[in-house]
Amino acid sequence: SSLLLKVNNLSKKFFVKSEQFSETLTIDAVNAVSLSINQGEVMALVGESGCGKSTLGRCILRLEEPDTGEVFFKNQNILALPLRELKTYRQKMQIIFQDPFASLNPRKSIRFILEEPLLIHGIKNRKERQEKVLMIAEKVGLSPGDLDRFPHEFSGGQRQRVGIARALILQPDFIVCDEPVSALDVSIQAQILNLLSTLQKEMQLTYLFISHDLSVVKHISNRVAVMYLGKIVEVAPKKELFENPLHPYTRALLASIPIPNPRKRRKKILLQGDPPSPTKPPRGCRFHTRCPEKMPICSEEEPLLWETKPDHQVACHLFPS
Ligand code: SF4
Ligand code: MG
């Protein structure tokens, strides 16, 4: 499989004014993240809310400007491109948002919402645009009659179909799916996941699939990257990650997934408390304040990602052991 996207050492901080203490706080949202995504794969990015997943996804698309780092898309460092030239790449890299309602203009018809990206990217022929709109609507399960309706007339699941259609209409190669089913009723989640999975195969798409929920990525992903407080702590093929998780944080996340057969229940590692504030990430291993396997070195030295075997990387002082 060939490399489509390579992220090197990407970091992003935010500065927020704290009214209460009249000081500026630094949020260390993404810290020195490196990640490779192959053509045609679904890479899941998993972690608790606030760990920097969405920021990383947005930085990769340059919807947010990273402070440092490189993002190679088809061997072009898109962070080095002037904004004018970025437009060509924007076509090939799209995003599907968590909340389809917030991301759709309520005053515009579905037809307009789907046609707009084509106009922006210079498809001048009206007939061609209309054909593309009809084609993509059908692909995501919308009827031609739906096109003249407005976002508020749709259910959450239907709106997410519109969000997916809009992301796909320019025939991208790469899509950041940012918690695409988290805002939907459980009964609808499987439908949308199946749709995303079918489209991924049919259109040979590559996804970075962001979720706080490992059970959501279990079926759709090929590989999984686990993120904690701005850092990637483990990356492995999905099967390997579920069967042989190494990082104590990954094991804790897995232990929190309900397992139908109680006899197969793993020994539980419970997560103690909430994650620390990203304004004050702990020294050394950022997980040490909650880790049941903490050792003296853990609060002193930051563990680096270590390849335990080809394709399986972990950042924890327990490895190499
Ligand atoms: Fe736990 Fe130490 Fe590993 Fe961090 S480095 S996950 S604190 S054992
Ligand atoms: Mg998010």
Image (spheres, rainbow, N blue to C red):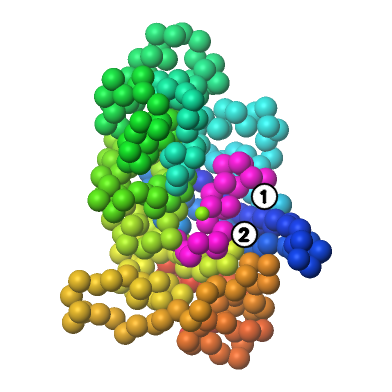
Using a 10 Å C-alpha cutoff, classify the residue at mark 1 as few (fewer than 14 neighbours), some (14 to 19) or many (20 or more): many
Q: In the image, what residue occupies the spot 68% across and 67% down? A: 279
The image shows residue 232, relative to residue 139, as above or below, that is below
Pointer 1 or 2: first along the chain:
2
Is 201 contained in the magenta span?
Answer: no
Q: In the image, what residue occupies the spot 49% across and 37% down? A: 103
Q: CA distance from mark 1 to mark 2?
A: 9 Å
Residue 41 in the image, given as x and y percentages of width and height: 38, 48
Q: Residue furthest bottom?
A: 296
In front here: 37 or 155?
A: 155
Residue 308 in the image, given as x and y percentages of width and height: 45, 73
Query: Residue 120 has which mark?
Result: none
Q: Which residues are magenta?
A: 46-65
Q: Which residue is identified by label 2?
A: 30
Query: Residue 66 has which mark?
Result: 1
**Can the viewer see residue 162 in this picture?**
no
Q: Quadrant of residue 17?
A: bottom right
Q: In the image, what residue occupies the spot 47% across and 64% down? A: 47
Q: Is disc 1 in contact with disc 2, using a CB cutoff of under 8 Å?
A: yes
The image shows residue 60, relative to residue 85, as above or below, that is below
Side (left or right) of 50 relative to 145: right
Residue 39 in the image, given as x and y percentages of width and height: 42, 43
Side (left or right) of 160 relative to 261: right
For badge 2, the amino acid type reads: Val
For badge 1, the amino acid type reads: Pro
Side (left or right) of 60 relative to 40: right
Mark 1 lies on a secondary structure that is loop
